[in-house]
Image (spheres, rainbow, N blue to C red):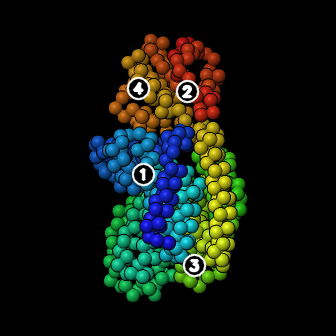
Amino acid sequence: MKKTIQIVLFSLLLIGGLLLRTIGLTRVPAGFFCDEAAIGYNAYTLLHTGADEYGKPFPLFFQSFGDYKDPVQIYTTIPYVALLGLSEVSTRLPSVVWGMLLLIVLYFLGKQIHSPVAGWGSAIAGATMPWLIHYNRIGFELNAYVFFFSLTVLFFLKAVQRKSWLIPAWIAAGITAYTYQPAKLLVPLLLVGIIIIYWKKLRGAKSFFIIGVLVFFALILPLLASFFTPEATARFVMVSVFSAKLSLSQTLFKIASNYFFQLSPQFFLVGEPTFITRHFTNGLLPLLPITIPLLCLGLLEVLFTCTKKESQLLLWWLLLYPIGGAVVAEAPFTNRAVIGAPFFALLIGIGLALVFKHSRHLHSKILIGFIMSVLFALNLTIFCQFYFKVYPLISSDFWGWQFGAKDIVGYFATHEANYDDEVMQGEFNEPEIFLKFYAPTQCKKCQIGDPESLYNPKRKQLFALTPEYIGKHSEFHYSIVKNILYPNATTAFYLVTVKK
């Protein structure tokens, strides 16, 4: 295939992946979670004050909701906020960009590990994988994590052939450690595996190896120092299986069951055992079902060629991928084990390459390619219909994306002069962050509460309340000012004035 044609086709692939990640970016998912708002708002305060939301100048870790967020996603959100202002779009766009850069990495990884066709297959699988599409549309830390983790693997593979790549590889590994909580555990394990597998090659580049190691430790030295403070481990302490206070045998069983569940058919064909619809449940699956046979074929190829260094690296990646989800107390797992997404994209790419490799005649290659393209397009269409039409209707409530804060605070900010108090009921995770995010310089009268705690007949007050609250508190008389609807047209909140 001529280079110009390859560039055109790859550009079309990137455009397709970009459309899947940006169409209706503020509508799907339907809502905006508190972690996203915290990342966007801290980028905003850094841009304008040089400090986080608590006034700490350029911190390494960001205090947030009782734990600490890692810095990479927040600092890399600053340019988007500077260009577009503080908004849902500017907060989610960095994740889109990480996702698009990952597709390029997947192409080169597939090509490096197996073949050019595997590179194309891996990039196509990544561009259309629900696991990546969903999280690339959300302003979460994990998007930077999966990109830099994959980039680290690519750079080390490059270093096996050209030793000067060792220094960029160690730098990428160091950055990965600051992206997301699981990286603190998985990056060292990844490096151990790479060094063991490629030791004979790496020791031949002694000077580059030593310089790279020194740079890596210089980068992570602040991280190592933070392990003696609550900052680096607070989140792990909150959600890990060790916080459940189980016996040793129960803890080991829980870790093992979590680990192997992520390798089970149920994980890929049914979804996660969780009621939290922000993640892969209620019909949202991590992979397109049509790609699973190719994945299995790619896995068999890796197993049958396990004497090859590249296959050993992939098998090591397979063993590492479930660990992030295994050590948490409960599902969801797809966010903590998101490094599995590029790994499975690579297996799908290898499987696709094998199908074409064993098709001996040109006409059979064309026929197989046509049939697979039709089935793939049909599967992708079904996913898009579900994700963009159905998913917003079933995932906007409290256990989903907690829709409504934008409309409430927006109304509060534009009608602030008409009221003495504007009160939003705390039916959100960490509701205060939404007052900061949606009205960083407005809404001075805004606060969190309800009529039970803040009603004052001498003040003109506007409350944002759920229908459930109003139904349970008949001691108040409510006059509806505005009705805020979920995407499924049911009422999320009423904006009301209150009398007792």
Q: Which of the 4 image quadrants contains residue 179?
A: bottom left
Three-letter residue code for mark 2: Ile
Q: Amino acid at mark 4?
A: Ala
What residue is drawn where x is 66% and y is 55%? 379
Which secondary structure, mark 3?
Answer: helix
Say whether marks 4 and 3 touch (CB < 8 Å). no
Q: Name the foreground residue: 199 vs 70.
A: 199
Identify the mark nearer the N-term, 2 or 4. 4
- Disc 1 target residue: 94
Amino acid at pointer 1? Pro
Instruction: Find numbered disc 4 in the image and state the secondary structure of the residue it sits on.
Output: helix
Q: Residues within 10 Å of mark 2 (few under 14, many from 20)?
A: many
The Cα–Cα distance between marks 2 and 4, rounded to whole angstroms, is 16 Å
Say few, some or many: other residues with alpha carbon within 10 Å of mark 1 (under 14 / 14 to 19 / 20 or more).
many
The residue labelled by disc 2 is: 484
Marks 2 and 4: CB-CB under 8 Å? no
Of residue 463 and residue 382, the one placed in the foreground of this image is 382
Q: Seen in the image, is 164 located left or right of residue 236?
A: left
Q: Are marks 2 and 1 in contact (CB under 8 Å)?
A: no
Residue at the spot 39% in from the left edge and 56% down from the top edge: 72
**Residue name at image x 65 percent, y 63 percent:** 370
- In 3D space, how far apart are the residues under numbered discs 4 and 3 (Cα atoms)? 57 Å
Residue under pointer 4: 413
Disc 3/disc 1 C-alpha distance (Å): 32 Å
Image coords of residue 142 (percent x, y): 49, 56
Residue type at the position of mark 3 = Ser
